Amino acid sequence: MRKLPNNLSKRFICTGMCIALATAMCGCGKGDAASDVTEEVTSEAASEAETSTEIASVEATEAPSEAATEASTEAASVETTEATSEASNATSDTTSSMKSDSSSEAKVETTETSTETISQESDNAVVVAGDDSIEADEDKQLQVIVNNADTWKGVFEQGYYTVTDLDRNGRMEIIAASCQGSGMYTYAKVYEVNENKDGLVDCTPDNSSGDIDGGMDYPDFIIDGNFITFTNGSKYVYIASNSTRVSAGEGVETISAFILENGTFGVNDLASKYVNGDTVEYTKLSDESVITEDEFNNISISTYEQDGYSRFETTFSWTDLSSGDDYANLLNCYNKFMGK
C-alpha cells in the first residue's frame, strides 16, 4: 500500500474531530447544523479522498510508466550491448574471414610462385640438359673425326685443319687445306660426319682431290679471321677472295662464295679483277660484263642481299696440329666457328 501525503493524513484527522464535535452538539439542539457540517465535512473528505485516489492513481500510473521506461531503457541498453557485441563479433568474424582469405590468397600466391619457380627451374634444367646433350653430341662427333684421322690427316704435306658446320645441319666437317705452288693455289678436302655419326663422308668434288696437280684452286680461306656470311635460313654462303699469280706483274683476284650444300662442297666465283701492268679490268663473271671497281668490291652484297639474304660474320680458325692434342686443337677451331 502506498503511504498518503502528510497534508491528506492531517485532513482525515481534522474530519474525524469535526464528526465527533457534531455528534456532541446534537444533544444541544444544534443537530441540523451539526448534520450540515457533518455532510459538508463528509463531502469534502470524500472529495479529498477522490483527489487522493486520483493522485494515487496517477502516481500508480506514472510508477509503471517509469518502470516501463526504465525497463525499456534497460532493454534498449541490453539490445544495444547485444547489437554492439554482435557487431563486434561480426567485425571479428569479418576480420578473421579477411585474414583467413588473405592468408589463403597469400598461400595460393605462394603456391603459384613456388609452382612458377619450380617450372622455371624445370625449364632451366631442360636447357641445361639440352646443353649437356649438345656437348655430348659434339664430343661424339669430334671423336669420330679424330678416330678417322688417317682419312684426312696427311692428305697434304703442309696441311692446315679446321672443324666447321658450314651448312648448319648439326653435323661437323673437317677441312684439310694447303696453299702451295708458285701461283699460291689453295687446295682442300672436306669431310662431313655421316648421318649415323660413326664415320666420315667425302664432300669434295672429284676435281679437288689431294693430287695438287689435278686439284681445284679454292678461295684463300686458310686465314684466321672473320668471313662475311650470307644466309636465307636454309643456305649459308661464305665470301672469300682468291689471288692467283700468273707472272710477274700479272695476276687475277677473284671474289668467290664457298658453300656446302646437299653434301657437296663447292665454289661460286662472282667477279674478277685482272691486273697486267697498268691495265686493270673488272668483270662480273655471271654474264662476263664489265663493272666498276665499286661494283667489284660490293659484288657479294649485290648478289645475295638483293635476293633477301641476311648478312653476318663467321670466324675461321686453323691449326697445323704440329703440337698439342688433336682433339683439343680441333675443338677450339669449332668453338670459334660457332661463336662460342
Image (cartoon, rainbow, N blue to C red):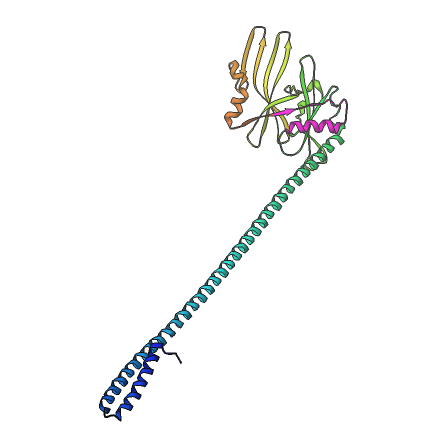
User: Position of 215 compared to 108: left or right?
Assistant: right
User: Position of 325 compared to 35: left or right?
Assistant: right
Residue in view at x 25 percent, y 89 percent: 34
Residue in view at x 59 percent, y 50 percent: 111
Query: Is residue 331 magenta-colored?
Result: yes
* 262 or 214: nearer the viewer: 262
Quarter of the figure with the C terminus? top right
Residue in view at x 26 percent, y 90 percent: 25
Residue 131 visible, this angle = yes
* 85 or 192: nearer the viewer: 85
What is the residue that sits farthest to the front in this orientation? 28
The stretch in magenta equals 314-340
Indicate the position of residue 214 as horizontal and vertical percent values.
Answer: 69, 19
Number of dots carrying numbers: 0
Placement of 171 over or under 267, stated as above or below: below
Indicate the position of residue 105 as horizontal and vertical percent values.
Answer: 54, 52
Quarter of the figure with the N terminus? bottom left
* 185 or 329: nearer the viewer: 329
Report which quarter residue 219 is drawn in: top right
Residue 290 visible, this angle = no
Indicate the position of residue 264 as horizontal and vertical percent values.
Answer: 64, 29
User: Position of 10 compared to 175: left or right?
Assistant: left
Query: Is residue 32 magenta-colored?
Result: no
Placement of 126 over or under 76, stated as above or below: above
Indicate the position of residue 339 as horizontal and vertical percent values.
Answer: 63, 28
Report which quarter residue 165 is drawn in: top right
